[in-house]
Amino acid sequence: MHNAHFNEVEENLWMLSFELAHGRIINALPDYTKIYFAITDDKEKKFFTNYLIKKCGFNKNEIKNRVYFFKCESPVLWTQDAGEIIGRNSNGKIILLSDNDTYSFSLNNIFKFFPDVFNLHKSSELLSIEGGDVEIVWDVNRKGVIALIGRHRVYEYFSRKENIDYKNIAVSLDKINEVKNAYKNLFYNINVEIIPEKILMQPSIATNELFHLDMVATVLANDEKVYAFVPYYEKITGYYVVRLPIYDHPVRSPTNIVKFINKKTDKPTVLLGKYPYYNPTIPKEESPFAKIENAIYNIDSAVKLFEKNPDDKNYNDALTAINLLWKIFNEEYSSKNPYFEKQKKTFTDCGFDVIEVPTCASGSGGLHCTTLY
């Protein structure tokens, strides 16, 4: 009986961990979306399958038709940073661009398991392809595409080439152009812009809290204009710059989003994270965020007692603590959040559809970080 209890608690903790990292993104995805999910073993496959059924309302037929599993040696922490999707080849295969860095094993494996769907390209050993810091977007006139890369790809380039950390050293214009040309050659000769390039030459004005492009800007296009959404940052010349209100750490910036053309509506659409509200909604009560945080502490205490003494009481106490957090999730995710509403309105006022993704401010990444699309 104790083994069954341990397995049940472990599965519940896995589901909570997934929810804390990804929020309710599964239910926000259009129902035509194919989901490729990395697993370390068959037990994790079982956990995710049960999560889809119990928490997302999937049936077995939907799982069979929409969900594809592939094995990885270790968990994929930040899926977006594994590489960049740069289009399709003449055979219709999705082209994955990766380097040989920390995250490359996940794309190596997805290509190995699904060679008829994906085509894997490797960059040169000097070029880092962390997807959170690299993006191909429309140019300002929507006549072609350009590549945007964050300043940390420049630091990484010279770290690999010269074994020197340039974060606190001014980078010369010649060196900046060297990196631009290297990425230009990689991206089939399209123009490359570094965001923000100025900081490379003036490191004293930099902040280490902004370490990826998806924290400072995102570019979206509709039938009329190409917009750069920028949260309190220097304007990007040429785009219609729209200021996005931000009230949290930059990693949960409203530019850290998932964006796509919805096949059902044919409209540019944004998946926008709705994080727990930080202020009490009722005077003298805990804020939504504090409720979630305290519930997590209670789970930690209850599970430790269960591990130490796995009797029926501690087992029931652990499940009660876990179920309380699910209850709080459901209550707080459906509650009003004025910060989120302001961010949502900024996008909708510019003509973009927004799908809210209730999620938690856990870890050091947002929606864009945890999804490769």
Image (cartoon, grey):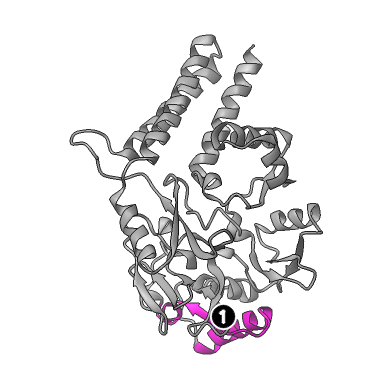
Determine crowd level at label 1: few under 14, some 14-19, many 20+ residues with C-alpha closer than 10 A.
some
Which residue is rendered at x = 48% and y = 73% of the image?
222
**Residue 2 image-quadrant placement:** top right
Residue numbers of the magenta segment: 173-202
Compare residues 318 and 285 and report the one nearer the observer. 285
User: To which residue does mark 1 refer?
Assistant: 146
Q: Look at label 1 and name its amino acid.
A: Ile
Name the residue at 39% across, 64% down: 347
Q: Residue furthest bottom?
A: 174
Quarter of the rendering containing residue 186:
bottom right
Q: Is residue 212 visible?
A: no
Q: For this view, does 309 lie left or right of residue 104?
A: left
Q: Position of residue 209 (x, y in %)?
A: 41, 61
Q: Quadrant of the C terminus?
A: bottom right
Q: Residue at x 46, y 25 (%)?
A: 323
Q: Relative to 89, is 320 above or below?
A: above
136 and 333: which one is in front?
333
| Quadrant location of the N terminus in the rendered image | top right
Residue 30 is covered by the magenta coloring: no
Query: Residue 265, percent across and down?
Result: 53, 61
Horizontal placement of 307 versus 89: left or right? left
Q: Is residue 342 left or right of residue 46?
A: left
151 vs 181: above or below: above
